[in-house]
Image: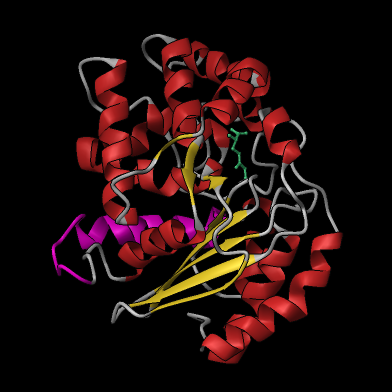
Amino acid sequence: MQFLLNELVDKNRAWTNYGKVAGYIPELSKKDPNKLGIVVVDVKGKIYRAGDYETKFTVQSMSKPIVLLLALLDNGEEVFKKVGKEPTGDAFNSIIKLETLNPSKPLNPMINAGAIAVTSLVKGKTKEEKFKRIINLFRKVSKNPKLDINMDVYLSEKKTGDRNRSIAYFLRDIGILEGDVEDILDLYFRQCSIEVTCEDVANMGMVLANQGIDNESKKRLVPKYLTQIVKTFMVTCGMYDASGEFAINVGVPSKSGVSGGIMSSVPNKMGIGVIGPALDYKGNSIAGVKLLEDLSKELKLSIF
Ligand code: DON
């Protein structure tokens, strides 16, 4: 496995010359596009690391499946009164269907509109308490008690995130968001700015792969049923409007982020964390996807 990972990182590094680092969050545009790293954690706890696996990056949209777990723990199926279960075929930050559907709600929890609605459902008396609950779950599933926010990325998105601001105010207008919109956005920007490494992300994918159980302590962290819901969303919507092609070529529940990270979860086998900051126009890491394609073919990881 170690040899294979080294070989596949070397082979796919050329792809980092294609695509672009996300520009709409100014702080992300400073990242090195030529990085490519991967960590695989298998159910037995073996860890394999290759390439630039020590690179730090923010979770961005890879936070969506984890915060969805918390909202489902807090509210059960009530969550689906506010957000749907269907793919959109639109960009991750699209606003168009919110106006054209009637009655309207975000189509799924993996697009920004759906994720903002999900974040608003996290329980807590204050914003601080809500964030504490969010970060604590991240620390648990990543097995990294030191996880925290990258302040520069957080402030950068908070200052420039007008698309998300528009989506959130629209959501309040149609009755999906309740409460203070700026507070909800602030929580969402914070969850996106949590800083991780490939190993943290691989551990997060591992908990989902292992049906909610920590593979080392054997402790149940979340109910199996919720991990099934979340992994299904990762298959149908995790790579946005590239989810169908990714399902054919890789066939592993995965979630991308605009930082260039990808969290993958191979049921009952392994969690995978990948970083490759240069993105295609849909917001997915070009080299990261290519690397996962090769790995899936070599190890026959497709669930289909
Ligand atoms: O809300 C945003 O636009 C970012 N914080 C996260 C978007 C994202 O990661 C989309 N992923 N490819």
Q: Where does the image place residue 97, in percent across and percent down from the top left? A: 64, 32
Q: Relative to 57, does residue 166 appear above or below in the rendering?
A: above
Q: Relative to 88, does residue 112 appear above or below in the rendering?
A: above
Q: Relative to 149, does residue 221 appear above or below in the rendering?
A: below
Q: Where does the image place residue 225, in percent across and percent down from the top left? A: 24, 60
Relative to 171, 126 lies left or right: left
- Magenta region: 216-238
Camera-nearest residue between 91 and 122: 122
Is residue 232 visible from the viewing direction of this image?
no
Instruction: Say which residue appears at 33% left-offset and 45% top-offset.
Output: 138
Q: Relative to 109, does residue 188 appear above or below in the rendering?
A: above
For ligand 1, which image quadrant applies?
A: top right
Q: Magenta includes 57? A: no
Instruction: Say which residue appears at 28% left-offset and 25% top-offset.
Output: 130
Instruction: Say which residue appears at 70% left-offset and 57% top-offset.
Output: 285
Relative to 290, 135 lies left or right: left
Camera-nearest residue between 191 and 211: 191
Extreme-right residue of the structure: 18
Relative to 91, 193 lies left or right: left
Number of marks drawn:
0
Q: Where does the image place residue 216, in percent across and percent down from the top left? A: 21, 71
Q: Where does the image place residue 282, in percent across and percent down from the top left? A: 74, 49
Is residue 303 visible from the viewing direction of this image?
yes
